[in-house]
Image (cartoon, grey):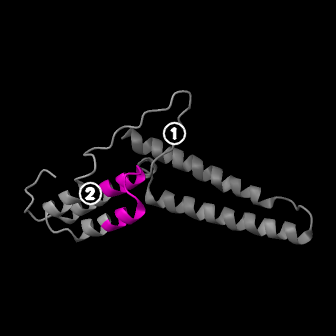
């Protein structure tokens, strides 16, 4: 920490320390018991000195992982990237997409149960839910184009 060790730490400082501890655990620098102990100490810390003691044996920054030669790397979106990708979508559209996905899930489940109960595959009527899904996708696209133009 860059502050004097006797100054009182804020909740945001404790959360930052918890995030650093989680990163150290994810990197394999801390086992689960040590991570749990340090996490409890981070949330009960009063001063910056209390927080600093949690990191004396850990590196200050996380080193960048070097790709292994010959092994292709795969991109996996982080939670922050997923949240940012939906950040510009209006709440009403998020609600409509959630409702549509729920209706599709219920209808496919009912169709599957009916098909299994009959012992034969029945007509896949949930495919008609693609029509409102397509309309919703077009509406979302138009909304995002109009919002991003301004």
**Element carrying mark 1:** loop
Label 1 Cα crowd, 10 Å radius (few <14 / some 14-19 / many 20+): few
**Element carrying mark 2:** helix
Which residue carries the number 1 mark? 75
Label 2 Cα crowd, 10 Å radius (few <14 / some 14-19 / many 20+): some
Outermost residue on the right side: it is 119
Measured as percent of width and height from the top left, residue 125 is found at 80, 60
Residue at image location 41% in from the left, 53% down from the top:
26
**Does residue 35 appear to the left or right of 96 in the view shown?**
left
Residue at image location 35% in from the left, 52% down from the top:
24
Residue at image location 53% in from the left, 45% down from the top:
141
Q: Which residues are magenta?
A: 20-37
Q: Is residue 46 depicted above or below 27 in this figure?
A: below
Residue at image location 64% in from the left, 54% down from the top:
133
Residue 113 numbered mark, or none = none
Which residue carries the number 2 mark? 16
Q: Is residue 59 depicted above or below 99 in this figure?
A: above
The disc, 2 or 1, on the residue closer to the chain's N-terminal end is: 2
Whole-angstrom CA distance, mark 2 to mark 1, is 26 Å
Outermost residue on the top side: it is 70
**Does residue 64 appear to the left or right of 71 in the view shown?**
left
């Amino acid at each position: 920490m860059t502050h004097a060790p006797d100054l009182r730490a804020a909740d945001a400082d404790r959360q930052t320390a918890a995030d650093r501890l989680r990163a150290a655990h994810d990197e394999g620098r801390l086992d689960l018991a040590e991570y749990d102990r340090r996490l409890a100490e981070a949330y009960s810390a009063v001063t910056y000195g209390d927080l600093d003691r949690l990191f004396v044996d850990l590196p200050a920054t996380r080193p960048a992982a070097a790709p292994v030669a010959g092994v292709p790397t795969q991109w996996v979106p982080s939670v922050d990237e997923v949240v940012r990708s939906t950040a510009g979508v209006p709440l009403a559209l998020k609600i409509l997409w959630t409702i549509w996905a729920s209706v599709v899930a219920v209808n496919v489940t009912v169709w599957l149960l009916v098909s299994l109960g009959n012992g034969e595959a029945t007509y896949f009527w949930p495919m008609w839910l693609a029509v409102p899904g397509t309309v919703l996708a077009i509406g979302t696209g138009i909304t995002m184009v109009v919002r991003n133009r301004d």
